Each structure stands twice: as structure tokens, then as C-alpha cells.
Amino acid sequence: MDPIPPRVTMAAVWTGAGVDVRTVPIPALGAGEVLVRVRLATVCGSDLHTVTGRRPAACPSVLGHEAVGDVVAAGPGADIQVGQRVIWSVTVACGECPRCRSGLSAKCLSVRKVGHEPFDGDWALSGSYAAHVVLPRGTTIAVVPDALSDAVAAPAACATATVMATLEAAGELGGLRVLIGGAGMLGLTAVAACADAGADVQVVDRNADRLALATQFGGRASDGGPVDVAIDYTGSSAAVADALARLDIGGTLVLAGSVTPGPPLAVDPETVVRQWLTITGVHNYEPRHLHRAVDFLDRTRERHPWDALVVAPVPLKQIASALHSPPPGKLRTAVCP
């Protein structure tokens, strides 16, 4: 017999002026809904942008969208077992609209997002900076292999899965020269994934500590020469322009970091035509990318020091201390509710 799920939980509510850790009721689960006890949540850079005022977000809300947890209860029709350790997608899709049916569920016409919904709406426990999170029907859930640690699994729900989507957009990478713009968690993961695919991987980043990390994951400092593929995670128009200028004939530029308005980029259509260039963008990811993320991390867990990228977690009551940029040599702070 399954244990009776709790009726209340603790959640860190972002108020616009700070975080307020409070007791929150857990709603009765509807059809297809899942209740997860959060084991560990990592702090994505987008949440740091929210709390520093650089990124608009629902307020009040429970932030957090990179996490791993244990299933403690499931509503009717939920295809998951109580007790399984899981991660879950950032986006929640309807599965029925034209975009979902065309394979673009990340851009569902009624998309909702984990860690982005108003606390005073109908999905209060939407974020992972809480002891429990409610996952609605339409959330992609992936079971985590036993050998994969919580600290390695948690970022898969955002950083690693997004990287899997950008690599798919870039195409076959074996034997190609690849330039990665930015060596944060996404960029460093992309370095490892591109190297794993057989590419010669170069990295650009203004942070010397991050460039040094990249060498541990299969990359090297940029030599300034032509490349076949460039993937940008910086969001900097200047960096994107530099990457575009380095593309060789038939090259592909994938943009993933440009998620806020910035200066426009000058693109010469004749250059695109004569050099057979491809420019594309990726925002969020599809269900298959979440599963690929878990597989990739599990396959490379002994090859790369993934655990070393995450700071030791703090308790939920001390979450304010985790909502800051990580120290040198680290790429994620963490909370352990």
C-alpha cells in the first residue's frame, strides 16, 4: 500500500524583494498529476537573472526548474511509479494544439513552465525551490539511473536537455570543427557532448576559470580559425557576430543564449547564400532531449567530473545564500529541501 502523501510542505516564495520560506498546502492530485519530493535543486542562471532584476518573472512565485526528486504520489492515469527517482521537463504542453502535433511542444500554444508560474494562480507548487513540487499532466518525466548522483542529474532538466536540442539542430558533428560560445553549464556540457560526438571543440569565454574547466571536458581554447559549426550560449550579439564570421563554407550557426532583447545583428544575405550558411535558433527542448540528457550524463559520468561543478547544497531555509553566482571553478549552487 502506498504511503499517504503529506498535506503541507515548505516552499521558498519569491516576492520580488527576496524569498520567503513558508508552509504551503499540497493540493489533491488531479488526473495525470504527480507529486514529487525534491531531493536537490540546482540554481540556473536564469533564476539569478530573475532575482537580480535582469529578467521578468511571475511574482510571487516558487522559482527553480532544475531538480531531482522522488515520486511520492500520482493521480489517476499518471504513467509513473511511486518511489522512482526522477527529473522533469521545464515545459508542460497540452499535446493537442497545432504546435504540439507538429513536434514543437516546447512552443505549445498553452505552454506552462516549471518554476515560472504565479504562486497565487492554480499551480502554486510549480517550482523546485520547495520540499515538494506538483507536476501536471503534460510534464515529461524521466527516471534517473541509480548510479547517477543527484548533483549530476538535477541540471539535466534544463542545461543538459537544452544542449541535446542544440546539438540536434547542429546536425552530425563527427570530424567537424565546432566553436562553443560561453563555458557556463550549458557551454561546458556542449563541449563534452560535441567531443563525445567526435568533434574538434574550441571554446570562447571571457572567464579564464571557465576556459580552464573546458579543457577537462574535451575542449580547447579557440585558435581563431574557420569552423564548421558554431553554437552560442552567451546571448551576446558581438559574440554571435564573431561566430558567424568564422563559419566556413556550408557552416551552421545555432543560437541558444539569445533569450533577452539585444542589439540587432547585421547579416549579409549574399554571404549566407554564397557560403551556403545555416542560421537557426533553439529555445527549450522536446521530450526526447530530456531522455537523451539522462543517457548522456549516465554514459559520461566516469569520464567527466560533473559532480565537481556543483557547490554543496544548503538547506531550503538558507536558500538566499544560494541565489548568487557560484564561486570560481563551480557552475551551479544548490538547495537540498
Image (tube, rainbow, N blue to C red):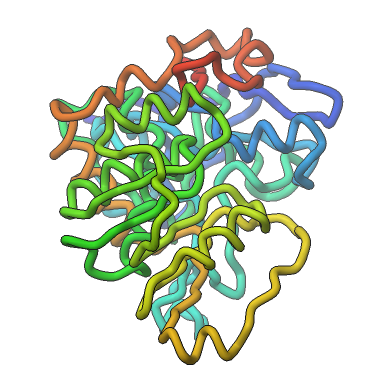
Which percent across, then down, holds residue 29?
A: 48, 45
Q: Is residue 65 left or right of residue 192?
A: right
Q: Is residue 130 left or right of residue 37?
A: right
Up the image or down, 178 lies above or below 308; here it is below
Quadrant in which the N terminus appears: top left
Up the image or down, 66 lies above or below 197; here it is above
For image coordinates 61% across by 63% down, the residue present is: 241
Quadrant of the image occupied by residue 324: top right
Quadrant of the image occupied by residue 242: bottom right
For image coordinates 48% across by 22% down, the residue present is: 209
Up the image or down, 104 lies above or below 238; here it is below
Q: Nearer the viewer, residue 250 or 121?
A: 250
For image coordinates 49% across by 28% down, the residue present is: 132
Which percent across, then down, holds residue 96?
A: 46, 79
For image coordinates 44% across by 51% down, the residue present is: 224
Up the image or down, 244 lies above or below 217; here it is below
Q: Is residue 287 left or right of residue 138?
A: left
Q: Is residue 76 left or right of residue 51?
A: left
Q: Nearer the viewer, residue 49 or 149?
A: 49
Q: How many marks?
A: 0
Which percent across, then down, holds residue 301?
A: 18, 30
Which percent across, then down, holds residue 154?
A: 38, 32
Q: Residue furthest right?
A: 17
